[in-house]
Image (cartoon, rainbow, N blue to C red):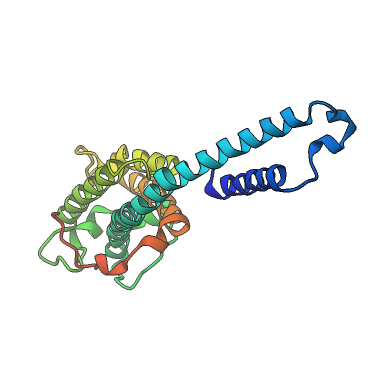
Amino acid sequence: MKIKALTLIFICALALTFWINFIDLKLKTFSIFINKADKLNAIIDNLSLAFIGGYFFYFLNVYLVERNEKKHILPFIAEKTGRIINGNNEIIRILKQNKEITEYNTDVKEFKTLVTLDRIEKLIVYNFTNLTFRQYLEGNRNNTLSSINKILNSGKHVDDELRAILFHLDEAFFLQDNFTLDNPNSYNIFFEYFQDIQKLNMYFNNNLKKYYNPRTYTRSYTLME
């Protein structure tokens, strides 16, 4: 239960305790509680006090601890997620030979024209002009898998939605050792993989962007962490 809901119940419990102990108007004023009002008041008071005590314990020992953890863990998760997204978006920039692209919206037909063996051999790899596109993909693959592994191992603050996206990416054929650009179906493999990158990007914008410090990433990132 979120802290806001618990706080609302805490306020109600505090009000009940204050009412029972400090206000003359008690439940015994209602006929249904004749001869039982004191017992009922005591039960409600004890339950309220128990919840108040439990709330303080939760707030001090769980909520504040988790909030402090999130201050350190979520920026780490955001940085690694941003690294995955930016590194893979760089592939699109290279494929389209346009280093100014910041967002892309492409389909399988366009990938079919982009991922051809003739084009691939001639591609200029921005920031890594000494590398071929094949070499760049291998370095990017290693970085992506490394970042996925670090996020998944970062603890309980990786929620189910992010975990599902990362597991799907981790199992993508695009990131497997046996993937090759010589595969006649490689354009379709590209397309399916980048659909998952788009899902990750949507998750990032909705949940992690506020924790992300862009200074931790530049396009000239190393291909070997």
Residue visible at 32% across and 66% down in the picture: 213
Specify the quadrant that holds the C terminus. bottom left
Q: Quadrant of residue 94?
A: bottom left
Give the x, y percent position of residue 4. Answer: 57, 50
Residue visible at 87% across and 35% down in the picture: 30
Q: Quadrant of residue 71?
A: bottom left
**Residue found at the far left of this picture:** 130
Residue visible at 48% across and 57% down in the picture: 206
Q: What count of labels does the image hold? A: 0
Asked whether residue 79 is in view, the answer is yes
Answer with left or right where residue 21 lies relative to residue 53.
right
Specify the quadrant that holds the N terminus. top right
In front of the other: 65 or 202: 65
Give the x, y percent position of residue 220. Answer: 19, 67
Answer with left or right where residue 72 lies relative to residue 27.
left
Give the x, y percent position of residue 106. Answer: 43, 58
Give the x, y percent position of residue 5. Answer: 59, 46
Q: Quadrant of residue 145?
A: top left
**Residue found at the far bottom of this picture:** 100
In front of the other: 136 or 44: 44
Asked whether residue 217 is in view, the answer is no
In front of the other: 157 or 64: 64
Answer with left or right where residue 73 lies relative to residue 57.
left
**Residue found at the far right of this picture:** 31
Answer with left or right where residue 9 lies relative to residue 160.
right
